[in-house]
Image (spheres, rainbow, N blue to C red):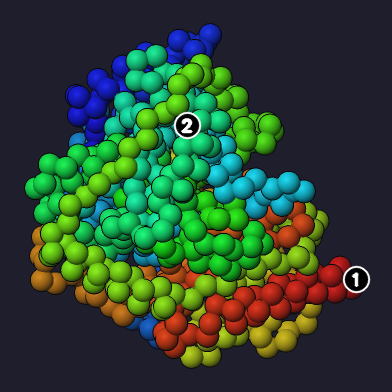
Amino acid sequence: MDPIPSEKSEAHNSQQIYAKYYSTPPLYQYDTLWSANYQNLPRLPLPDLETTLANYLASVEPLATPQVVAKHTELAKAFLRDEGPCLQQMVESDFARINQTLGFPYSYIENTWLDVYLKLRCPSVVNINPFYKVMDDVGPNPYSQVKRAAHFAHSCLRWTRKVVAGQLDAESPKLCMSSFYRMFATARIPRSACDSVKTFPGSTNLVVLSNGYAFSIDVLDSKDGKIVSLDHLEKAFANIILQSSGKPGPSIGAFTAADRETWAAVRLALERNPKNKAALETIDRAILVVALDPIPQRPRDRQVGCANLLNGNPADRWYDKHVLVVDAAGGLGMVYDHSSTDGHAWQRLVNETMSDMMGLKSGYTPLPELPIRSDAPTTVQLKFELTNLANEALVRTLEENAALSKRVDLDAYIFFDFGKNEIKKWGLSPDGVVQLAMKHAYFLLVGQERGLPATYETGLTRRFFHGRTENIRSTTTESAAWLRAMVSRETPEVCSKLLHEAIRAHLSAARRSSDGHGVDRHLLALKTKAISLNDAELPQFMRDELFLHSGDFTLSTSNTSFPFLDFVGYGGPAEGWGPDYIILPSEIHICITGWHGNHTPSCKVFGETLTECLREMKALVTLNARL
């Protein structure tokens, strides 16, 4: 996963080109941005086994009856006594070796976590790749599709040059910046059993997908770094739409929506043809893929916009790369490959790019003013020669994708009653309030049958070198006590007291996660070692029903409260819901995903119930304040 020598050389040469446009020395060397800990961040800690098991047992206590929990606790004690120490020692040996070396992996879980993504064989669409829907341009003269796509792409190109020049300023508090190396000009390469990731630091092209056709635009001069003019980029996009109109093209991008084994086999077959191989490598190298969608949606049609980003139009997607999607009404969003980067880094890109587009301050140093090329960029249509077998595979892929799309359930809406500002006046955590309301909604809909939900809430570990994410197990005994009180209609005084206790417990779980002492990554490392020792059978503790249930998250949640975002979404769990939420000062944007036919009420029903639970939360706080 570390850059190979030729890649590092390419990165070094690219930095030399763009560093000269800055008057200040670089903050880092681009060729070692991935591998050098230039901020001197600590390594992600490896928790001790006893502490992890204690925190784990506390997290499962609200998920089952006391009898089931007691039985499971005995299995955990046996694991701590028997298999656990050996597995922990194996992980500790890896940890010690990592601390002595200067290469990948940079934490005890990094390689295992990357493999979770790269070894998944399901389609990337819905299952892996999330989307960001950027706020619509709703001014009196909103940008057209071509104009908005060109402006975003142009500002984004300048942001990437800021990274390449070594001028991406640090965040406060200090967070790991290594993943920005793989934020652009990077591709996930399909291979049998396990994919790979490759970055092309010297890339100079964009790839544009329109009506099933693929085009490459040379947007940067490889010698002096001059950038295509905004006017020329607009004209290039407009010409591509015109050139691709009429009969749909071969829709090669749809292959990236297939299951990974199918796509790996098809790609290997395609690469046997030199023309196909060159075209695929051109797409891999692209700084960014731009999809110009023909969907004539209204800018405010949030349901259509979110669905189109999550699982729409596979002919004009390339799920192995980050894709900027702009629809015919100028609606704009991004679809990300999740294998080597995470949401916090994507938001940095969106924030600085949109701020530059709109002439606003981003909170970071401005994007570079690069010299403009006087000539129009070269635009080349990428052509593929498909065998009969490849054509048959493409037809099957499109059929399977259509079937998948029919199963996807999604509801996106805005809760207007209150937002972050009012919640803070209550003296409560906005994130904690939304988390509790979601559990309340879950319990009202399916709690009598299923109990409380095992909840995944994304937490960040970026304050550690190469830290990525950890799960905040936000269903706690305190949240369970509050839910029981609300459902049984206890007095406002009792419910309010339990509410504050539940919020404090949630904050504690969130801090533990961000401090590198969550349980899920550690348990995954132990489980992976157990599988390596005995592929036939895991320790009984890890085979117990409660262990499996606690990791089968029926609420898969994420708080993505960042500037310029309208909605964020990803595929929901097999049984349950996947609500993402953006808590703004006076409103909350919520996108809920799930699956039709999974014996769970629809996402719309969950959203309506969540709305009532949020209102009930406000009523409780307001009533208690009067008492």
User: Compared to 279, does 315 lie above or below?
Assistant: below
Quarter occupied by residue 221: top left
**Tag 2 near tag 1, CB within 8 Å:** no
User: Compared to 371, does 356 lie above or below?
Assistant: below
* Residue at 31% across, 26% down: 202
Q: Is residue 453 left or right of residue 399?
A: right
Residue designated by label 2: 157
Q: Mark 1: which secondary structure?
A: helix
Return the residue nearer the eye: 332 or 132: 332
* Residue at 32% across, 42% down: 381
Q: Position of residue 600 (x, y in %)?
A: 48, 85
Alpha carbon separation for disc pair 2 and 1: 54 Å
For badge 2, the amino acid type reads Leu
Mark number for residue 415?
none
Q: Is residue 463 left or right of residue 13?
A: right
Kindly report which numbered mark, 2 or 1, lies closer to the viewer in this rendering: 2
Residue designated by label 1: 626
Return the residue nearer the eye: 176 or 578: 578
* Residue at 53% across, 55% down: 327
Quarter occupied by residue 275: top left
Q: Of marks 2 and 1, which one's residue comes earlier in the chain?
A: 2
Q: Position of residue 90 (x, y in %)?
A: 18, 50
Q: Position of residue 514 (x, y in %)?
A: 48, 48
Q: Can you see residue 17?
A: yes
Q: Can you see residue 345?
A: no
Quarter occupied by residue 627: bottom right
Q: Mark 2: which secondary structure?
A: helix
Could you tell me which quadrant the N terminus lies in? top left
